[in-house]
Amino acid sequence: MHWPTWCRLRLQASEVGPLSGSAAGGFGPSRRWAWAVAGIGVVASLPLVLLGFPHPTIDGICYLQWAENFSAQFWQGELYPRWLRDLNHGLGSPVFFYYPPLSFWVAALLQPLATASLSSWQTLGWASALAVVASGLAAWVWLRGMVGSVQALVGAVAYMLAPYRVALTLLERGGYPEHCAFVWMPLVLWGIQRQHLRLPSGWVCTALAFAGFFLTHTPTTVTFTPLAVLYALGMSWRTAWATVGAGIVGAALAAVYWVPALSTLDWIQPGYWQTPYWMLFFSPKAVLTAPFALADGSQRANLCFLGLVVTVVCLCPSSLCRHAAAAPLRLRRVWWAMAVVVVVLMLPISLWLYDLLWPLRMIQFPWRFLAPGSLIWAGLIALAWPEPTAPAWMRVLHGEVVLITGLMLVALTARAYAATCLAPPLRLGRVPARIDPMGRDVGEYQPASAQTAAARLQMKTNQVLVLRGSAQAKILAWRPRHMTVDVQSDTGAHLLLRQFYYPGWMAQTSQGLVLPLKPDEATGVLSLDVPPGPHTIHLRLKPKLPERLGWAITLAAVLVLGFRTARIHCCRWAIARCHWCRG
């Protein structure tokens, strides 16, 4: 069957079936399959719902601190908290000038339902469980447009519970944002498929999915976006150009985050860009203990990589056979090319490409390609599903891959749950130890002049410290990005305030006098000289040009997308009105 005709039939079946509850041409899905995917996801994520976010994990402590402070400032009226006031023991952190906020918005919206003293422990667990179910349904919707219900169910479950995604990223490392980014990959491909069929909403869906990607996890966006373009190119040049355009609009929608993030990297510590990525490829000489520091973590990462390689080797040849699934040969060839690209980019032979392209170095670790690799793994299982008339060797190879995948899902996930959510120190309703919401932030997101240890020693418990001269200081307001201090001094004084200096901080008296503000050389906290007399000083972290430019680009993209969506609805209304008049 010709590609556009086949794809249109599949999409019509996947859209009409759930609404009518009947099959369309033998392809119509029923709601029970989608409910089955959701049910499996709910059962698999019950420990996250009942026992909270996995603990202890490598990155989880950091995300718990961020989520606790982000949610607190969000519910105090700051819709987009960028400067977290209480991090670094009350010295502040600019972390959300550089880290995508979408997954933390989701956790913040769940915060009022939490009952634990550390609310982020519960809300991150609930949000992670929600991401598991949402990614499974997204994969179901996408796969159901290409293969039958059973194949789509198996592929969606394999993607939803992929070993790298649940066992390693979430449960072993506590990588909450990367875990949430799995929701967007199937939705991007689903939007591309709708674009190829020239459905009016396809371009809008793709742009929104790309925007969600950019606002969730940057490294996964970098690893997956070229593969999405390759997927679209395998359909047609027109689809590829439309995908690039949708990606640009999606990036513009997320400009409120990435414009200040990329343009102000020299304002924070430089350690983030010094990752020895050349040591982290999958090879006999690789330092495999670096990606996952927990015991045997490197072996599990290597196992996921080997599982992907086995799947590619076993299923790619059979996926090109005429007895595989019902998808067109062209689509299966594109999927095979994507699988080869992902595997190669995790091997040392691609080192020259990392040296050549700086966006690849942004992902920090080559094994992050296991994220799109998990999607390719699940897609191969669905697309290479042998037909009843297929040769025995195809059925044997496919059955072995499904069996290996199932064993890995169960074994790695059960082990990871036992070591985190179900560990003996944790019980229902008991807050994990070692979590200090005001603890020290990771070094790469601290301001360039920050000296945390020296600042804590100098400031002790003081919010305002008179370093030289004589003065009496009284705090009138101490909010994120805005502090008000009443100072009375007969001789003038030099003050230190318990917030790190970051470009944008300004000090001004109620009379309009602007006071010079700079970082203290020894500690990196705010330092200013106050003239003699009584003064009410307002200190504000004002948006600088990159932040304002990001908001402007996002607003322009919202208007463009809104105009496009309104035009689609107007056209549909006009067509419906025309049919009604004719009737």
Image: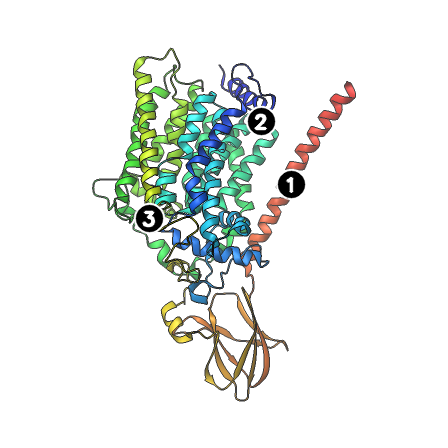
Residue at the right extreme?
581
Q: Where is residue 568 in the image (x, y as percent from the top left)?
A: 66, 32
Dots 2 and 3: beta carbons under 8 Å?
A: no
- Alpha carbon distance from label 2 to label 3: 55 Å
Q: Which mark is nearer the camera, 1 or 3?
A: 3
Q: Is residue 147 visible?
A: no
Residue with the mark numbered 1: 562
Residue with the mark numbered 3: 424
Dots 1 and 2: beta carbons under 8 Å?
A: no
Left or right: 350, with 551 as reference point: left
- Alpha carbon distance from label 1 to label 2: 19 Å
- Alpha carbon distance from label 1 to label 3: 51 Å
Label 2 sits on a secondary structure element that is loop
Residue with the mark numbered 2: 198
Quadrant position of residue 333? top left
Q: Position of residue 11 (x, y in %)?
A: 54, 23
Q: Which mark is nearer the camera, 2 or 3?
A: 3
Badge 2 local density, few (<14 within 10 Å), some, or many (20+)? few
Q: Specify which label sits upstream in the sequence, 1 or 3.
A: 3
